[in-house]
Amino acid sequence: MSTSARASYHHGDLRAALLTTAMGMLERGEPFSLRAVARDAGVSAAAPYRHFADREALESALAAEGLRDLKADLTRDREMPTTVAELAEFGVAYVDFALRRPALFRLMFGNECDTENDDRVRAAAEIHELLAAAIIGVFPDSDPVALAVAGWALVHGLAFLHLDRKLTSSSADEVAQQVRSSFLAVFSAQGATQK
Amino acid sequence: MSTSARASYHHGDLRAALLTTAMGMLERGEPFSLRAVARDAGVSAAAPYRHFADREALESALAAEGLRDLKADLTRDREMPTTVAELAEFGVAYVDFALRRPALFRLMFGNECDTENDDRVRAAAEIHELLAAAIIGVFPDSDPVALAVAGWALVHGLAFLHLDRKLTSSSADEVAQQVRSSFLAVFSAQGATQK
DNA sequence: TGCGCTATGTTTGCAGTGTTCACATGACGA
DNA sequence: TCGTCATGTGAACACTGCAAACATAGCGCA
């Protein structure tokens, strides 16, 4: 059964239905294809092309949605951090997102961001700004741009290394602890300059 | 013309020829398919299956080769670092590799490392050890495991963020300078505990 | 020298994919 | 009421990964 029953020839809101169907397949780890998405939505293989220029366009829309979800995860139940320990929890949430929704995370970051999709570009920029603000809030005295880039790179690298099983880590708790350790190891000595 | 002329029915060393052909296509940024590789090597579409179980096996072999190349790049003309500045040059070389050979880099790190391929696993472990040794050499007094992971994650994240154009950076020099800045910003405060 | 085993290559074919084009449908405004 | 046009369908093309049956020839052994 698809996300939205269809009484007639026309669907109603096929664009949205395709997105939720596709997202569900990603979530379930199923191999992803335009035809499979269309099939799952109960629609012909050519129908998606009325709403997305090509496969890449669908993927970009999914990526944009994922970026918004990630931002929501990062800000949920959380104030802006003021200590390194609180900053580390940002990293934990980031890596946790990557491990909970691996296929989506790879869509978001595993290919070149096509600048065509304004939605996606904006969502990515918002993540960037959020992380930058968090880091600058904790280290007001240091080179803000360089440190913000470094902080993002750190969580991003941790996420990918765990995703690709390049690091030994069995449980989710163990991963979280490893992220905390890395944050503390890198940033601890900077505690001196901290607010 | 392919990498190796073929006078007779049998090829001689098709396995090696397929690898160099495929690597060349990656390098040129061409879309990558088993059939295309076979065509380019002047051989039928089914021939590669005598040497590689499936497409993934070919990709793993390429990834292993890439990992060895990366390690060679990291160690070429370089002593083990003793200062943060020298450590940063490791990061520059890592990111430079990713930007010079993007398709290969994605093959190496953009998908889950299949533990079947011993060659690939070993090559990945060697990169890990090299980076860990470099970092521990510079910071002998800190938590070695956590700092090694953090250091790898930092360069890895920088590489991916640049690859995906999530960071503003026009020229290669500019990228290198950004990597140096990030390294210094993160590690500078630790200089106190440094050898 | 000649024979046959086996590694390696070929041909053919299947199922699945992205994409396009001509055509069908039906919701909505004139 | 009727025509228009956004949105759906079906059929087709070129491509992919992969498998099975068949062809070739290099190499060990009588």
Image: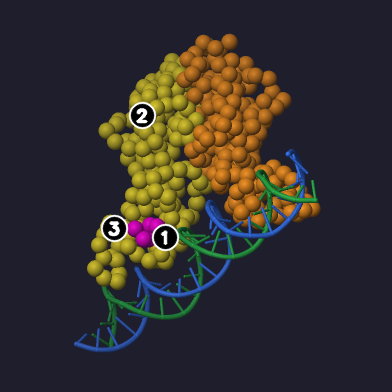
Chain colours: A orange, B yellow, C blue, D green
Q: Quadrant of the C terminus of chain B?
A: top left
Between B150 and B109, the one lying in front of the other is B109
Residue at position x 29%, y 71% in the image: B9
Residue B103 against residue B156 in the figure, above or below: below
Q: Which residue is mark 2?
A: B172
Q: Which residue is mark 3?
A: B2
Q: Label 2: how many residues lie within 10 Å, few (<14), some (14-19) or many (20+)?
A: some
Q: Earlier in the sequence, mark 2 or mark 1?
A: 1
CA–CA distance between discs 2 and 1? 34 Å
Question: Which secondary structure, mark 1?
Answer: helix
- Judging from the image, mark 3 belongs to the subunit labelled B
Q: Earlier in the sequence, mark 3 or mark 2?
A: 3
Q: Quadrant of the N terminus of chain B?
A: bottom left
Residue at position x 64%, y 51% in the image: A47
Residue A52 against residue B86 in the figure, above or below: below
Q: Position of residue A138 (x, y in %)?
A: 58, 16
- Judging from the image, mark 1 belongs to the subunit labelled B
Residue A82 located left or right of residue B12: right
- Judging from the image, mark 2 belongs to the subunit labelled B
Looking at numbered disc 2 in the image, what kind of residue is underneath it?
Answer: Ala
Looking at numbered disc 3 in the image, what kind of residue is underneath it?
Answer: Ser
- Per the rendered image, the range of residues in magenta is B36-40
Residue B148 against residue A143 in the figure, above or below: below
CA–CA distance between discs 3 and 1? 14 Å
Q: Main secondary structure of the magenta part?
A: helix
* Residue A61 disc label: none
* Residue B35 disc label: 1
